[in-house]
Image (cartoon, helix red, strand yellow):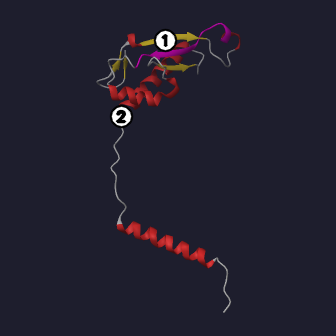
Amino acid sequence: MLRISDDIAIQDWELSESFVRASGPGGQNVNKVATAVELRFEAARSPALPGPVKTRLKRLAGRRWTSEGALVIQCDETRSQARNREIARERLAELVARALIAPKRRIATKPTRGSQRRRLRAKKARGQIKTLRGPVEDD
């Protein structure tokens, strides 16, 4: 079980892990041992996550979200299979924790009268500078 917060925990049956051969350095060992982990979380079917959290998670996941509604996290950072597993689980927990935070709604405000006056005064001054750049008339 992967605990995200006090009231949300992902059960083991919702997660599936597969181990594949990692790319990168490792010498002869890299061709023999499957150390890279691919963690798959069936997020769309998860009973642990409420609907709004799922939609935020889908947006945060981006390309890692599959068409079936699963979240796929890959990790091949270390040469240790166990450590890659931990890193993938930490990434999943962090992603779900970020999706739990609902964004604050923006309250539309009007510009103050003073700021409107300052803006118009600055525009007028800039216009004056530009008119002074024009052709000079003879007296």
Q: Which quarter of the picture shows residue 4?
A: top left
- For residue 37, the mark is none
Q: Secondary structure at mark 2?
A: loop
Q: Secondary structure at mark 1?
A: strand
In this view, the residue farthest toward the left is: 7
User: Which residue shows up at 42% across the image and 24% down it?
Assistant: 93
Q: Is residue 112 left or right of residue 30?
A: left
Q: Percent from the top left, x then y, of residue 35? A: 58, 12
For disc 1, the marked residue is 17
Q: Is residue 70 left or right of residue 131?
A: left
Residue 82 is covered by the magenta coloring? no
User: Which residue shows up at 34% across the image and 22% down it?
Assistant: 49
In this view, the residue farthest toward the top is: 32
* Nearest the eye: 91 or 138: 138
The number of numbered discs placed on residues in the rendered structure image is 2
Magenta residues (range): 30-43
User: Disc 1 or 2, which lies upstream in sequence?
Assistant: 1
Q: Percent from the top left, x then y, of residue 68? A: 45, 17
Q: Percent from the top left, x then y, of residue 5? A: 33, 26
Around disc 2, counting alpha carbons within 10 Å, would you say few (fewer than 14), some (14 to 19), or many (20 or more)? few
In this view, the residue farthest toward the right is: 28
User: Which residue shows up at 45% across the image and 18% down it?
Assistant: 70
Locate the C terminus by quadrant.
bottom right
For disc 2, the marked residue is 101
Residue 39 is covered by the magenta coloring? yes
Amino acid type at mark 2: Ile
How much space separates mark 1 and mark 2, taking CA atoms? Answer: 27 Å
* Nearest the eye: 137 or 110: 137
Amino acid type at mark 1: Glu
Locate the N terminus by quadrant.
top left
Q: Percent from the top left, x then y, of residue 76? A: 58, 19
